[in-house]
Image: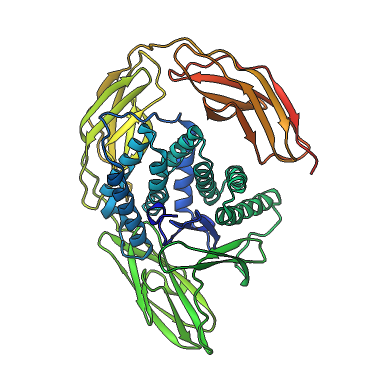
Amino acid sequence: MPQSESPSAAAELRIGAYLLEVGGRSGSFAQFQAEEERENARELAAALDEQLQRPPAVVAAVEEFQESADAVTGRIEQADKLVRAAAGGQLLDLGNVSGEVDSLLDLFARLDSEGRFEEQLKLMRSLNGLLALSLRWLDLIRSMLALLRSANAAGHAAGQAFAHHELGSLNLCAGRPEAAAKHLGEALRLEGAIGDLAGRCATRHNLDSAHRDLALRSGPRLPRPRRIRRLVVLAGALAIAGGSGAGIALAIHGGDGHQRSTTAPPPPPPPGRHRLTVTLAGKGTGSVRGPGIACPNDCRAPIREGHAVILIATPTNGSALTSWSRPECGRASRCKLTLTRPLTITATFAPATDHQPPTAPTGLRAVAVSPNEIDLSWVKSSDNVGVTGYVIYRDRLKLTTVSGTTTAYRDTGLAPSSGHVYSVQAVDAAENASPQSALTKAKTPPATDTQPPSTPAGLKATALSSSEIELTWTASTDNVGVTGYVIFRDGSELTTVPATQTSFQDTGLDFSTRHVYNIQAVDAAGNRSDESSSAEATTGPG
């Protein structure tokens, strides 16, 4: 794989019950951790909810895209370098590169609108790590769904597998094992079809974790795993192209059934010593130093049995130390420990106490760009610490919240010939809110296409296994053009596939279970056909 296609370094991010390794060549690895993180998991789940409740946005190319293939390759290599720097601990505050990330997101959208899928996929393999590390969940999910739509349209199995794997990993970390198993199962099927052994290793690892979480959820009396017993099993040697040569992927299996993967397991400490490991957590930033420790760069050190060590936590400007994971250390900057066994300690940083709200956003403009979309833009607010988000109001009701690094929003899914009133409010990390901006109005133009597509015909459902049913149908027609098909399972909307697709594999089903399907065709104006005739099938026995 060319070096610009994906970074060789990987960085770790605590989300829920997992430590997500992002930026690796074989996709994200979800490593089970003993102490559950909650804030990132809540925000990731909220972003998944918001994206699932809104229709996919259509990328609008507002100006001609003229970047050459060489120029795009250079931008992808720059994204790769940023991920390497973040993984190596050289970027303590990813907010400092938010402008570069915004520029890469714009490039991704333009590649999408131009149908330059191969370049789009290469960029996403680096961009997904940057978006995750900077906690830009909504941008990450939207981009990954856009990549999946493009991969489906291009019939690109490797791109579909990558997108399903990453979406499955995000759902797993957000505590959604059902959705995770569905995406990861589809990724595993695609990787098997194209012979991607390294990808299957990563996907199988995360899929096993999803199945374990499902089992724990269905059996409430089962205790939640609290630690990982170290039984190291060689999972396979994976050649890593570029960098320093080859690495070996190891799976660490605990009694709880979870696995944790790494490409560089640390050497055991010398006899008579225990390993001290420091981790950093929270929305703030900072560092920890001590004997042999200079975290986030060097976070492990062997310490002599019974030896007392002092760790010193130093927050960066605008942050504060809120706690150590050892209760005896409290919130003091100095934490004294005596090691009698291997120990991991976490220092949590948060934005410093702040009671000053940001200034109100100014210059709010609303422009109707289609019968179903109004685009907003405004001048950024200022704050004594930093703006973290903008709350957008439509018709005086809260619509959504966007990142503090953006000053634009596309309101899609609107009705034709409908007028709306907008305002925007800035918020900071301490949840101080500015006054709302001045109101602005816009009205969508009337629809130019009111004719729905023809009803899909010839729907057939065939059980392929104990967990998979395949659907096939005859393509619909439309006066302008069909853009997709909405699939319903047992009366509920399941998913939407592109118009180029007249088949669908519904995976991750329970065995010996009957399901009833219908489909609808949809066009670019949002017109939907009548539902097709029903088709039903029963999965095979387990």
Q: Where is residue 456 in the image (x, y as percent from the top left)?
A: 60, 17
Residue at 31% x, 55% y: name it: 94
- From what the image shows, is residue 372 above or below residue 351? above
Question: Residue 357 or 304: which is nearer the viewer?
Answer: 304
> Which residue is farthest right?
541
Judged left or right of residue 148, residue 423 is: left
Judged left or right of residue 503, residue 85 is: left
| Residue 258, quarter of the rendered image | bottom right
Question: Residue 175 or 116: which is nearer the viewer?
Answer: 116
Q: Position of residue 71 (x, y in %)?
A: 27, 45
**Quarter in which the C terminus is drawn:** top right
Question: Residue 523 or 349: which is nearer the viewer?
Answer: 523
Q: Where is residue 289 in the image (x, y as percent from the top left)?
A: 35, 76
Can residue 333 be seen at all in this image of the molecule? no
| Residue 121, quarter of the rendered image | top left
Colour option used: rainbow
**Quarter in which the N terminus is drawn:** bottom left
- From what the image shows, is residue 176 above or below residue 57? below
Judged left or right of residue 356, residue 430 is: right
Count every numbered label the image shows and give the total: 0
Q: Position of residue 176 (x, y in %)?
A: 57, 46
Question: Residue 41 or 487: which is nearer the viewer?
Answer: 487
Residue at 46% x, 84% y: name it: 303
Can residue 495 be seen at all in this image of the molecule? yes
